[in-house]
Structure formats: structure tokens, C-alpha cells
Amino acid sequence: MSGVTKWRARLGRRDPTTLPTGETGAAGDLGRRIATRRADLHLTIDQVADRAGMAPDYLNYLEHAPTVNLSGAGLTRLSLALETPIKDLLGGTQDRAGGGGRAAPDPVLTTIDRDQCEALLQGGGIGRVAFRASEQLVVFPVNFRVLDGDVIFRSENDGSVGHLAPDEPVSFEIDHIDDAMSEGWSVLATGTVHVIVEPDELRRAQALGIEPWAGGDRHTYFRLGVTALTGRLISVAG
């Protein structure tokens, strides 16, 4: 008995979102995208299942099954429930920058206070380091975490960031774009960067578990001492 068949038996009916045997549809990491989007919206499985008209147990199965096939109707229901385009659930926009959709009819741009900026920064993730090197402006993405309010990231010691003067100004930016809702926010931190060499500080930085997606020899830890923090939020009126 297949995984889907077992779940149909548990639910006592054939779920209308599954495809008949032999048809093809979205598969692979669809479940991961569903779970990630649900977490972004701070919704429980029960809440999304109610929105989509699905059984919670079945939605839980969709999030964890290694391979799932859904009909167009099922994808549409999940798309509406998760407030995101079907193409995003299917991974069709992975090679495109965010923000390609239309602006909202009544966008509102507001300033984020420092406490909100710190809370958004605290989550870690991927941000962009910007500084001037050899008369050129350099910007590159890094995986980061926060330690005592400062930004910690790893890079190559012999790279351009490793040659920054102690008082050289550096900017660091993170953001989030919600294409489905035409909303988003950005946080900009400024300060100076130094290589972490003091043993206790280095151990604390290593304990953060930063893993550079770029791989390679990136064993040097850098600390951006934040001296200024600003942010902006784009929301929809009403």
C-alpha cells in the first residue's frame, strides 16, 4: 500500500487533491515549501488545513512526504490558503529575484524602530555586506547570526573583507519580500568589522553554527560591531 493510499484509508475517503495513478504533478521538495510558507505566515497545520479545506492529517503528510503529486485544484487551494502563487510552491521562481510582481494598490512605507530592527536581525539568515575596497564598492551575501547585537559571519581571511581597516565603515543589509502580498521589509546596519581572534569570543562565534552556503575555506569569523540600525516596512493599507 502506497503512502498516499494509506492516508486515504485513514481519512476514510479519496482526497480530491491527489492525482489518479499515472498522472504527474509537483513533486520533490513541495512539502518543504508548504511548511516553510506556513511558518512564514505563523499558521498552524490546522489553520492552513481549514483554509484549504483539507484534513489536518493529510496536510501534515504533504509537508513530510518525500514525493507528493497534487492536482491543479489542490495546488490552487494551497496557494490561496498560503497566500502565495502556485509557481512559488512549485519552485518556479527559484532562479528569479524577489519583488518581480506588481505593487499593491495602496502601499504604505513606514519606518521600523530599533527594537523591531533588532528583532528582525536576530533571526539570522542571509544578508549583504557592503564596503569600499580598492576604490570600488563591494557587496556580497553572507550567512550570518547575531551575537550580543553584533553581526557575525564567516569568510576567507585573505579576501577583501579581511583587509579592511579597523575604522573602515561597513554596511550590512537584510530584507524579506512577500511577492504574494506585495509587502516587505528591510533593515540596514552600519558599523566596523574586525576578525575574531580572542579565544572566548571565537568559541562563542563558532557555537552559533554559521554554515556558509558558498562552501570553501571560510574558517575566519568576522564581527560587525553595529553602531546604527534603521529599517523600513512596506505594507498594504487597510
Image: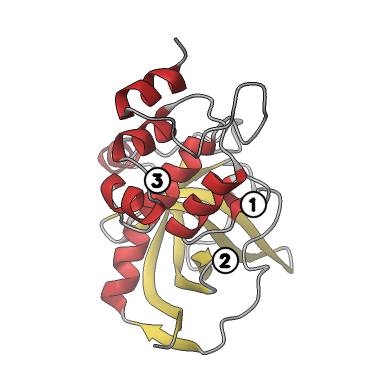
Q: Give yes or no for contact between labels 1 and 2 (Cβ–Cβ under 8 Å).
A: no
Task: Label 1, secondary structure: give it.
Answer: helix
Q: Pinpoint residue 141: horizontal percent, then vertical percent.
A: 59, 53
Q: Are marks 1 and 3 in contact (CB under 8 Å)?
A: no
Marks 2/3: CA–CA distance? 37 Å
**Horizontal arrangement in the rendering, residue 217 relative to residue 136 (left or right):** left
The residue furthest right is 135
Which residue does the numbered mark 2 point to in the structure image? 179
Residue 196, numbered label: 3
Q: CA distance from mark 1 to mark 2?
A: 11 Å
Label 1 amino acid?
A: Lys
Structural distance between the alpha carbons of marks 1 and 3: 42 Å
Residue 87's disc number: 1
Disc 2 versus disc 3: nearer the observer? 2
Residue 217 to residue 144: above or below? above
Which residue sits at x=52%, y=59%? 84
Q: Residue at 54% x, 25% y: name it.
A: 67
